[in-house]
Image (cartoon, helix red, strand yellow):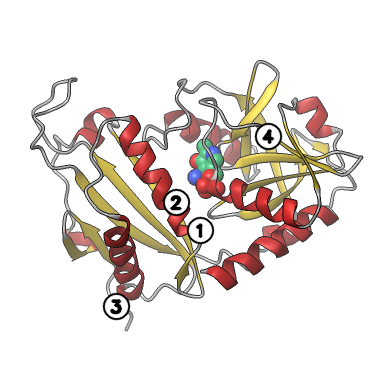
Amino acid sequence: MSNPRIVYLNGEFLPFAEARVPIMDRGFLFADGIYEVSAILDGRLVDNAAHLARLDRSLGEIGIRNPYSLAEWIALETELVARNAVAEGLVYMQVTRGVAERDFAFPSADTPPTVMMFTQAKNVSANPMAETGAKIITVPDIRWKRRDIKSIALLAQVLAKQQAAEAGVAEAWMVEDDAVTEGASSTAFIVTKAGAIVTRPLSTALLPGITRLSVLRLAEEAGLSLEERLFSVAEACAAAEAFYTSASAFVMPVVSIDGHVVGDGKPGPLTRRLRELYLGMARESA
Ligand code: PMP
């Protein structure tokens, strides 16, 4: 018999079914909170310090005090992963501005934030889609202007992912002013015919992807050519390769965009190499 799923809520490890949040939680009423996701590989957390640094930054940007130190976060995550015996998958961390009578402005400073964490067991390393490559669509980017904050307000991404699901594809790349901003839950990359790896520079227009950061570092260490600049859907369709990165997909090849075949319709050599480099780094450092 498998153990029951255990989640973390406000200082307690609880069976999933017993974890309850009041209806006046500001996360529920206003999406007033942020979240973070780290991958688990071989039972260990991948790129976790960087994810926790982004969590701290997201909290700071919306004026919620970080309830835990880095060491406390790591201890809680580690215990949750162990209690659920997750060898491969994801750990989600979510912090909201807490529970208070409905009113837009912040509640009193002594209102404790709501802290919730759960794990998902998932085959992240041996994902069959990495072999075939992902098909994607593009959609208009209808989000707000502080996309650098990992907000739990994900309605635009929900709608984008639903469009992708209805089109029978894995991801949607969001487009604004003729340039790809990012995927609905990933960072977008292309590889030019000259072999340069291209991704959008960081700004408030997109989330600073943690996997993006590691992939850029690994590419640089491997002596590959990098260009941080905007690119259009037309350039992506005509590129040699395309891929996206995220904590859950690692490095995922893209083989078709809005029905246009990218390259030869198979995962490209540079993309495969970056996936291997990332998995190697994740297995060593985790
Ligand atoms: N952009 C968006 C909008 C995302 O939701 C994600 C997934 N968290 C990413 C990019 C990729 O970020 P990371 O590599 O840190 O998972």
Between disc 1 and disc 4, whose residue precedes?
1
Question: Which mark identifies residue 51?
Answer: 2
| Cα–Cα gap, marks 2 and 1 | 7 Å
Sequence-wise first label, 3 or 4: 3
Q: Quadrant of the N terminus?
A: bottom left
> Distance from label 2 to label 4 (Cα)?
27 Å
Q: What residue lies at 55% left-to-right and 69% top-to-bottom?
A: 285
Give the image location of residue 14, x and y in percent. Answer: 19, 65
Residue 262, numbered circle: none
- Assess mark 2: CB under 8 A from ligand 1? yes
- Identify the residue under disc 1: 47
| Whether residue 43 is situated above or below residue 239 in the rendered picture | below
Gap in angstroms between the C-alphas marked 1 and 3: 27 Å
Label 2: element kind: helix
Q: Which residue matches tag 4? A: 137
Residue 155 visible in the displayed image: yes
* Crowd band around label 3 with a 10 angstrom C-alpha radius: few (<14), some (14–19), many (20+): few
> In the displayed structure, does residue 133 sit left or right of residue 74?
right
Query: How much space separates mark 3 and mark 4, taking CA atoms?
Result: 39 Å
- Tell me how far mark 3 sits from mark 2, CA to CA: 28 Å
Q: Which residue is mark 3?
A: 3
Which amino acid, mark 3? Asn
Q: Quick check: marks 3 and 2 in contact, CB under 8 Å?
A: no
Q: Which numbered disc, 1 or 3, marks the residue closer to the eye?
A: 1
Q: Nearer the viewer, mark 2 or mark 4?
A: 2
Instruction: Please name whichever residue, 100 or 276, is drawn nearer the observer in this view of the structure.
Output: 276
Residue under the image location 16 percent in, 59 percent down:
11
Disc 1 element? loop
Q: CA distance from mark 1 to mark 4?
A: 28 Å
Which is in the foreground here, disc 3 or disc 2? 2
Is label 2 in contact with label 1 (beta carbons under 8 Å)?
A: yes
Disc 1 crowd, CA 10 A, few/some/many (<14, 14-19, 20+): many
